Image: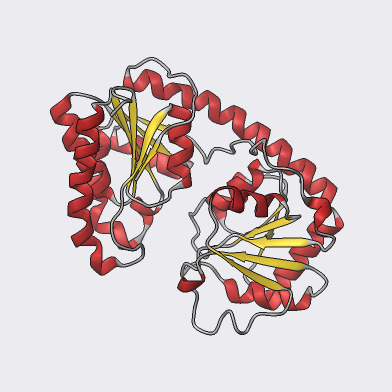
Amino acid sequence: MQNRGGIAAIAWSPIQRHAADYARRLNASLYNIHYLRLQRPLLAPIKYIPQCLKTWLVLIRQRPSAVYVFISPVFAALSVYIYCWFAGVPFIMDVGGHAIMSRKWAWSVPLVRFLAGKAGVNIVDQGAFKFLFDSWGVRSVLLERPPFARRPKLADTKAEKPAFTVTLISTFASDEPIEIVLDAAEQLSEMRFFILGDTGLAKKGLLAESPSNVTFTGYLSGDDYWELLNSSQVLIVLTTVSNSLLSGAVEGMALGKPLVLSKQPVLTAYFKKGAVFVEHSMESIVLGVRAVREHEDRYTREIKELAVEKRERWENEFQKIWTLIGIEPCALESPRTMN
């Protein structure tokens, strides 16, 4: 490979925006390693073996000076650790909250703890997780989800959509109460609603029952994704999980878009302004969206202020990573992405 040395970033997912953002900031070559389809748990033991082998192959080819790996699954970090142990290089383990809080992965927490002790530094995005890692006696840095700036090539398309536009950022996951958003859209017929996500993962009959002012976009990536968010007046991001710091909400903040969010402890602690928090009911969502429309200028100003505050704090904390892994900071350039 042309880019020998440097930092390699590993994510066992076909697309992982969070890992891509960190790879960009680390000036790392990003490898999205994944076989078969997502959300097929019975296939996991089968696909993890070739993904592990592919991880070793790309690392042997690049021979990086350090490796960044995002989990879950924890086996991504295990494969990186094995390589780094033989190669004698440090690795950075970025621990998604579900890797240590999800019931699905509860059995693997001892393995996460073992790997955390071997990592040059661990990245966590919540204070509670930082407290846990400190109690383990391992090195960790608290980096809340980074509100990276809006992409400069995007034009402000707000004037192109006369109707007040609301976008629900979703993946049709089990923790997303999408049905109540459809009910709210029916009550807000003067507004236009977009619902993101692969419609092949939606519940049967959900699309057919939607109001006429709702458009299901299907899965969007790259500029299509960012342009839709950029053209919306408000973004809705919902979850029934109490400790989930939603990436879609942070991305919306980076774009300066007012948010309607689930009233969950982690979200209310992070988004101190620029957001309206709602219960998972049609009435609450209707009131939340109307509140943003009525005071759009104020919520827009507040969310932009919050983005600046979060970005400055994130940059200060990020610099600790270089010291903890013992290498010089890399110049900020776009990473190469490999599948």
Give the residue at x 23% y 33%.
59
Residue 190 appears left or right of 73: right
Disc tally is 0
Q: Position of residue 104 (x, y in %)?
A: 31, 63
Give the residue at x 29% y 32%.
137
Most foreground residue, 68 or 140: 68
Residue reaching furthest top? Answer: 328
Q: Is residue 186 visible?
A: yes
Most foreground residue, 314 or 192: 192
Give the residue at x 45% y 35%.
22
Most foreground residue, 222 or 327: 222
Is residue 295 depicted above or below 212 in this figure? above
- Quadrant housing residue 151: top right
Q: Position of residue 264 (x, y in %)?
A: 57, 58
- Quadrant housing residue 114: top left
Q: Position of residue 39 (x, y in %)?
A: 36, 65
Is residue 54 depicted above or below 138 in this figure? below
Q: Position of residue 78 (x, y in %)?
A: 21, 43
Is residue 3 depicted above or below 135 in this figure? above
Residue reaching furthest left? Answer: 86
Q: Quadrant of the N terminus?
A: top left
Residue 194 appears left or right of 330: right
Residue 219 appears left or right of 122: right
The image's colour scheme reads secondary structure
Give the residue at x 18% y 23%.
88
Most foreground residue, 337 or 166: 337
Q: Is residue 114 visible?
A: no
